[in-house]
Each structure stands twice: as C-alpha cells, then as structure tokens.
Image (cartoon, grey):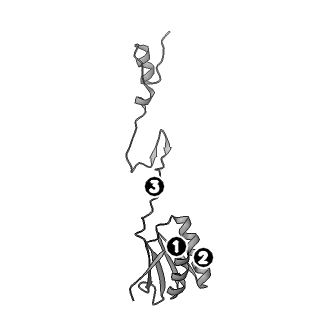
C-alpha cells in the first residue's frame, strides 16, 4: 500500500528527518504586511508615545485657518490622551465655551487666556503665554 504525503514535513519524516514547526512558518517582520493567507489579518502593535513636557504649558491665541474665529491652544503639557481630555473638559467648563483635543494640543474656543492660566496653575503647571 502506498502512503500519500500531504506536506513536505510528512515526506521528510518518512526519510527519517525531523522537522521543526517553527521553520515551516515564515516569520515575516515586514511592517507593511496587513494580511497573510496563513494567519489572516495582521495587526501591528500600536505604540502610544507622549511628548515629554519641558516644564511649561504654552498658551497661545490662534485665528489662522479658522475663518477669523479665535481659539486658545494649550501645548507642552506632557499628558497622555485620557488626561488631556479630562483637563480639556475642566477648562471648557470653567470658561463656559467649547473646545477639543487635537493630537497633544487642547483647543478652547474664545479668548479666555487668563481663566485658562488660573486653572493650569491651580493644577501645578507653569504657564507661559506665546505670541500676542
């Protein structure tokens, strides 16, 4: 009776060679790989990095790209995304305005720099006004 071999490892074992399962699976370290027929969808581990603070929270009033509407941007806090959103919520409630978190920058609508400075100093940040 003839034995049928379904894979190369079966053929190698018939001749007395031992095979290692890890060598059969190719380890692909290509960062652009998104799908493999053997493994399915490949997800890359997401690395979250927070830019360290230089010790100063920079508060700046901007109107550029906002059709003349003024917003106050706060940068250089050195906080992770969750803490930034929490701080932005507190700032918006204190100022009574809207705002958002874009990347590592908190944007608060309107010109409320003095109120923002008071809240940030209360939380232990050194505040520096940037620009006019």
x and y percentages locating residue 110 in the rendered image: 52, 87
Which quadrant would residue 64 be assigned to in this image? bottom left
Which quadrant would residue 122 be assigned to in this image? bottom right
Vertical comparison of 50 with 55: above or below = above
Tell which circle, 3 or 1, labels the residue nearer the N-terminal end: 3
Q: In which quarter of the image is the C terminus?
A: bottom left
Vertical comparison of 84 with 36: above or below = below
Q: Residues within 10 Å of mark 2 (few under 14, many from 20)?
A: some
Q: Is mark 3 on a helix, strand or loop?
A: loop
Q: Which residue is drawn at 46% across and 47% down?
A: 35
Residue receiving disc 3: 47
Q: Which mark is residue 35?
A: none
Q: Which residue is drawn at 55% across and 79% down?
A: 119
Query: How much space separates mark 3 and mark 1, taking CA atoms?
Result: 28 Å
Residue receiving disc 2: 90
Q: What element carries label 1?
A: loop
């Amino acid at each position: 009776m003839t034995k049928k071999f379904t894979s190369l490892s079966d053929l190698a074992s018939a001749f007395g060679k031992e095979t290692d399962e890890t060598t059969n699976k190719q380890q692909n370290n290509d960062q652009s790989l998104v799908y493999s027929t053997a493994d399915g969808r490949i997800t890359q581990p997401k690395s979250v990095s927070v830019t360290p603070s230089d010790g100063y929270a920079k508060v700046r009033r901007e109107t550029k790209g906002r059709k003349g509407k003024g917003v106050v941007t706060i940068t250089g806090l050195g906080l992770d995304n969750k803490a930034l959103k929490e701080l932005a919520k507190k700032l918006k409630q204190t100022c009574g305005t809207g705002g958002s978190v874009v990347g590592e920058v908190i944007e608060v609508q309107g010109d409320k720099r003095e109120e923002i400075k008071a809240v940030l100093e209360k939380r232990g940040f050194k505040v520096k006004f940037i620009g006019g």
